[in-house]
């Protein structure tokens, strides 16, 4: 029996998405390849959704493989120490400490491109998830676990270790924790949002010795060398990290900020007229569906979308 047209199309999309996921994973994409990928992604919203699913499965497998590898390495070191203990206890312990310290000092870098998300397990057991177009540098030290969010957004689940604080640096300031769950968004230079989902974190503006405590359900905005704290409505803290499931949740969010959150998932150029940039929108939207957001904007706000060259659009006042 021949496959139905829908089933055939679905199988083709699955096959193409699996190939693109494999090519992204190997990291050998040329600029021509990326242009072809962007064209494929924009051709059908289903393409982006299926590729995202493959990438998420791949990321979870990477995490499991890394954890398994670390467990095997730890077991091997334990067995090795036991074998050597009878002959040279002091030498074995010194060697183990040297190996551990070297591993913790080894920096790691993570980077995502357009529409990519990445999940990673760090050497201390902490977990980090990177949003699209984000970059993170890791440098674990003897007395401190230090990472730098170079750009974009990241969700952290930090393993508790009071003796070695976990510090996230951004251009707008730093976040210090000993073990908790939080989200950091540094999409703009000199500005960062820290949303706490569990426990407590401490934030500090550049050049300041004072730290502000931020508890679960609250958010800190670091900008212009200062820290502003605000309470969030029930459920809003979790909504700040909805990008992990491929969504953006807006609650009286300005049009400018809403479009900024969609930008890492699309290559299309979208600009907004200053006169309407501060209009506010609410709702839950799929980050893979830019056209769906644009349609909702024109339906809910007094604006219209003006198409331009190469798929670019500009949002202007409806009477303009």
Image (cartoon, helix red, strand yellow):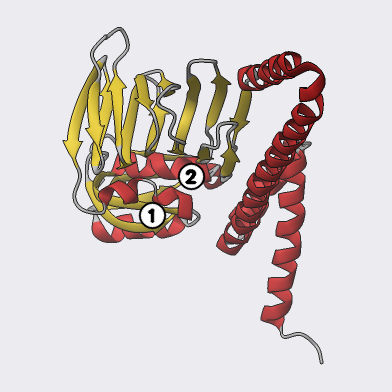
Where does residue 203 sit, x and y in percent of width and height?
Answer: 29, 23
Where does residue 69 sit, x and y in percent of width and height?
Answer: 72, 40
Tag on residue 294? 1
Q: Nearer the viewer, residue 200 or 88?
A: 88
Badge 1 element:
helix
Quarter of the C terminus within the rendering: top left
Where does residue 299 sit, x and y in percent of width and height?
Answer: 28, 61
- Which of the two labelled residues, at mark 2 and mark 1, occupies the earlier sequence position? 1
Q: Quadrant of residue 34?
A: top right
Q: Which residue carries the number 2 mark? A: 308
Instruction: Farthest residue to the front: give it.
Output: 86
Whether residue 213 appears in this view of the structure is: yes
Gap in Å between the C-alphas at discs 2 and 1? Answer: 14 Å
Residue at x 40%, y 29% (from the top left corner): 186
Residue at x 74%, y 59% (from the top left corner): 16
Q: Is residue 13 positioned above or below 195 on the image?
A: below
Tag on residue 122? none
Q: Quadrant of residue 300?
A: bottom left
Q: Nearer the viewer, residue 6 or 201?
A: 201
Q: Is residue 69 positioned above or below 187 on the image?
A: below
Left or right: 124 in relation to 259: right
Quarter of the N terminus within the rendering: bottom right
Residue at x 64%, y 56% (from the top left corner): 57
Whether residue 271 appears in this view of the structure is: no
Where does residue 128 sit, x and y in percent of width and height?
Answer: 51, 38
Label 2 neighbour load within 10 Å: few <14, some 14-19, many 20+? few
Left or right: 144 in relation to 273: right
Residue at x 76%, y 85% (from the top left corner): 3
Q: What is the count of numbered marks?
A: 2
Badge 2 element:
loop
Label 1 neighbour load within 10 Å: few <14, some 14-19, many 20+? some
């Amino acid at each position: 029996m021949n496959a139905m047209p829908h089933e055939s199309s679905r199988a083709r999309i699955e096959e193409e998405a699996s190939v693109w996921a494999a090519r992204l994973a190997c990291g050998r994409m040329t600029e021509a390849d990326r242009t072809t990928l962007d064209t494929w992604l924009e051709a059908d919203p289903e393409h982006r959704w299926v590729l995202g699913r493959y990438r998420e499965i791949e990321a979870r497998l990477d995490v499991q493989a890394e954890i398994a590898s670390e467990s095997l390495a730890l077991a091997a070191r334990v067995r090795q120490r036991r074998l050597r203990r009878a002959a040279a206890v002091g030498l074995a312990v010194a060697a183990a400490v040297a190996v551990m310290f070297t591993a913790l000092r080894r920096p790691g870098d993570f980077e995502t491109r357009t529409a990519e998300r990445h999940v990673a397990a760090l050497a201390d057991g902490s977990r980090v998830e990177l949003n699209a177009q984000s970059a993170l540098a890791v440098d674990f030290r003897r007395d401190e676990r230090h990472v730098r969010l170079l750009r974009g957004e990241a969700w952290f689940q930090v393993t508790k270790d009071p003796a070695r604080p976990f510090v996230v640096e951004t251009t707008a300031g730093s976040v210090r924790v000993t073990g908790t769950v939080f989200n950091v968004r540094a999409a703009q230079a000199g500005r960062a949002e820290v949303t706490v989902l569990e426990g407590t974190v401490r934030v500090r503006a550049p050049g300041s010795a004072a730290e502000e405590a931020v508890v679960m359900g609250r958010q800190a905005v670091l900008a212009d060398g200062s820290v502003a704290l605000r309470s969030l409505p029930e459920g809003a803290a979790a909504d700040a990290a909805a990008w992990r499931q491929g969504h953006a949740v807006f609650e009286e969010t300005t049009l400018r900020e809403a479009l900024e959150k969609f930008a890492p998932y699309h290559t299309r150029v979208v600009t907004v007229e200053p006169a309407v940039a501060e209009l506010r929108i609410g709702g839950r939207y799929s980050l893979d569906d830019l056209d769906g957001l644009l349609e909702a904007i024109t339906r809910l706000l007094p604006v219209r979308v003006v198409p331009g060259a190469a798929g670019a659009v500009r949002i202007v006042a409806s009477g303009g």
